Amino acid sequence: AFARRANESLLACDLFATGVEEDNCPEANLPMFLDLLKFLNIPEGDVAILKQNSLELRDVDVAAIAGSAIGGYRLFHVDGAHYAEATMHDLSVAACVLAPGGVVLVDDLHNLRWPGVQEAFHSYMRTVPPTRRLVPFLYTGRL
């Protein structure tokens, strides 16, 4: 959000509800997210907030929020449901709406609690032809 250019969109998609999915984080709630925006001095109106399952999200929906003028997102953070089907879907959406030279961040890639994230990542990387080619260039542990 801090590296956002004037013509770029911010988008958050989350269920923002506990107990809806097996891997939901109890801390993932809308009031907490809105408090974080306030703390970071990011106006709530600057963020398109979609309170839904990311499996319902299509690349055309995400692209429409970004607007055609900017050519896609420079940064896309995948941190949704942690099972393989959802992560694979989120990676495919991210790849489709990524600007040339853009970066996809994959959260919990090597977290032993969520093997579905790694399974989906490697499945995506082996898919021929891929939705869009992504090239891994950095791995970091927990910061």
Image (tube, grey):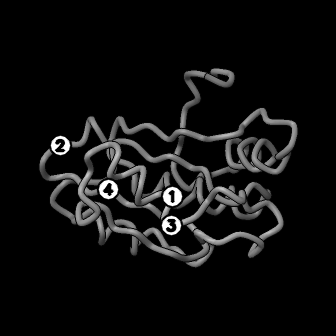
Residue ID for mark 2: 5
- Label 3 or label 2, whichever comes before in sequence order: 2
Amino acid, disc 3: Leu
Residue in view at x 60 percent, y 71 percent: 15
Q: CA distance from mark 2 to mark 1?
A: 25 Å
Is 47 on the left or on the right of 16, as rendered?
Answer: left
Q: Which mark is residue 62?
A: none
Q: CA distance from mark 4 to mark 3?
A: 16 Å
Q: Which mark is residue 32?
A: 1
Amino acid, disc 1: Met
Q: Position of residue 10 (x, y in %)?
A: 32, 56
Q: Secondary structure at mark 1?
A: helix
Residue ID for mark 4: 10
Is 55 on the left or on the right of 46, as rendered?
Answer: right
Report if the CB atoms under discs 4 and 2 are less than 8 Å apart: no
Q: Secondary structure at mark 2?
A: loop
- Label 4 or label 1, whichever comes before in sequence order: 4
Amino acid, disc 4: Leu
Q: Which mark is residue 30?
A: 3
Report if the CB atoms under discs 4 and 1 are less than 8 Å apart: no
Residue in view at x 61 percent, y 59 percent: 28
Please rate how many residues cluster around mark 3, counting C-alpha atoms within 10 Å: few if below 14, some from 14 to 19, many from 20: some
Q: CA distance from mark 3 to mark 1?
A: 5 Å
Amino acid, disc 2: Arg
Q: Which is more toward the observer, 27 or 7?
A: 27
Is 78 on the left or on the right of 6, as rendered?
Answer: right
Task: Name the quadrant of the N terminus.
Answer: top left
